[in-house]
Amino acid sequence: MNIQVTINGASRTWSIEPHELLLDTLRRYGYLSVKKGCDSGSCGVCTVLINDKPVNSCSIFAAKVDGSNIVTVEGVQAEAEKIGAYMVDEGVDQCGFCSPGFVLTVLGLQKELKNPTEDDILHYLSGNLCRCTGYVGQARAIHKYLKESK
Amino acid sequence: MILINEYRTPSNLQEAFELLQSSENSAVVGGGAFLRFSSKKIDVAVDLSKAGLSFINETEESVEIGAMTTYREMETSETLKTLFEGVLVKTIRNIVGIQMRNLFTIGGTVYARYGFSNLITTLLVLDAEIELYKAGRVTIKEYLDNRSIKNDILVKVIIPKNGQKVSFNMMQKTATDFPILTTAVSNNNGKIVIAVGARPAVAQIALNASQFASSNQLTEDVAKQVGELVANELSFSADLRSSAEYRKMICSVLVKRGLLEVL
Ligand SMILES: Cc1cc2nc3c(=O)[nH]c(=O)nc-3n(C[C@H](O)[C@H](O)[C@H](O)COP(=O)(O)OP(=O)(O)OC[C@H]3O[C@@H](n4cnc5c(N)ncnc54)[C@H](O)[C@@H]3O)c2cc1C
């Protein structure tokens, strides 16, 4: 079957299997920033924005996003570099495998919550696991990024 | 791995129901986040995204939540943040991450009668009803007891506003893991209802213990006694998260805690 999407601002028609998961479609079409981690909805490394909302692409049928607007890190490179720089400053950008999903969740947070508290930030990011760093430095980095991006 | 022959997104309920009936091996897609783990061969997958089932409507007597309403929509709803002091929000707000709660639907959760479901536990003590396209309106309790309801579409969940006080408690190994046990308690002018889920079987009301709690003045000692009654009344078993004995022990503690919260 075919679906029509807007991906990183460009309109595309994709040919998919009716049971295909969005993560597999994205990687098949070359959006390799989207990582396959746990492949069961728990780790968040496959996060993309669908109509501005963060969603784990491993857990949604590609057929469901017909007509949707999708954003991956390929479409927000400047923002990703900026968020990455804050993470480097705090020493929390290590293996980098979780970074694309993490960046997109932060962008989702920025769109959804106007004045997030420390608790809001931690709650929003709780679906993005990082096995290298622990979360204190990440929280610090994101807090600074959000404050200074206002 | 799940195999789907045809994926359809009908624009209304009647069309959805007809598609569902069109083959023995058809299935409804809510968020699809659990269905994707299935190894079934599905002839027609009927996605309800465009069938007008995403809503939270409040009236004088009840709150109605459409089957396709996501956990995140529930969690950020001003109505649900205040209803029963936000117990529904408390029930779901730590389930995995926001990325998944943007997908999980109330309809998929209730229809599938998941044993681990936080939400079913709370809905039971709220005396919630569900509306099914074919079978009509039944209480959640009747639905959980009556396994003959099949091949239907859950349209909405209806929660009566009885003014009861409600609490939800759970035990998990980590903040976003599946629960080891879920408990909910409601107090409607002295009528106490206690439900326990993730035993790991689906949530159930402890009828005798609830009756005992309703006919006694609730003090700390009585709450402790009721917790033990619940643990003895319901059955528990083991899975990879916990032994049956451990579940039984924490059951009495969580129920006692819940009772003291609804005094
Ligand atoms: C990684 C992970 C962790 C989770 N952790 C928890 C947890 O800790 N606590 C908890 O309570 N839950 C947990 N869940 C379950 C989650 O909360 C949802 O209950 C589950 O994903 C089902 O919702 P869904 O919308 O994805 O349903 P789907 O996957 O779309 O559907 C589930 C089933 O219901 C049927 N169905 C769907 N909608 C309808 C409808 N309207 N009418 C009739 N049939 C329908 C489908 O055919 C399917 O059989 C977890 C799920 C995952 C993937």
Image (cartoon, coloured by chain):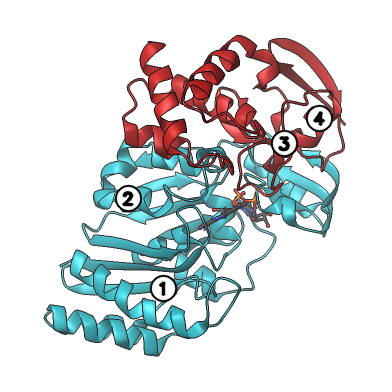
Chain colours: A red, B cyan
Residue B159 visible in this rendered orientation of the protein: yes
Q: Nearer the viewer, mark 3 or mark 4?
A: 4
Q: How far is mark 4 from mark 1, CA to CA? A: 42 Å
Q: Which residue is mark 2?
A: B62
Q: Say yes or no: labels 2 and 1 on the same chain.
A: yes
Q: Which residue is mark 3?
A: B9
The mark closer to the camera, 1 or 3, is 1
Q: Amino acid at mark 4?
A: Arg
Q: Quadrant of residue A48?
A: top right
Kind of residue at disc 2: Ser
Specify the amino acid type for callout 1. Answer: Val
* Marked residue chain, label 4: A
- Mark 2 or mark 4, which is nearer to you? 4
Are discs 2 and 4 both within one chain?
no
**Res. A107 visible in picture:** no
Q: Chain of mark 1?
A: B
**Residue toward you, A48 or B128:** A48
A115 w.r.t. B73: above or below: above
The residue to which callout 1 is attached is B196
Q: Answer whether labels 3 and 2 touch (C-beta < 8 Å).
A: no
Mark positioned earlier in the residue sequence (3 or 2): 3
Q: Is residue B245 above or below residue B95?
A: below
Residue A149, image x and y in percent?
41, 11
Mark 2 Cα shell of 10 Å, populated few (<14), some (14-19), many (≥20):
some
Residue B99, position as x, y percentages in the image? 56, 38
Circle 4 is placed at which residue position?
Answer: A27
Per the model, the C-alpha gap separating discs 3 and 2 is: 29 Å
The quarter of the image holding the C terminus of chain A is: top left
At numbered mark 3, what does the secondary structure look like: helix, strand or loop?
Answer: loop
Q: Which circle, 2 or 1, is nearer the viewer?
A: 1
Q: Are tags 3 and 4 found on a single chain?
A: no
Residue occupying image coordinates x 87% and y 37%: A17
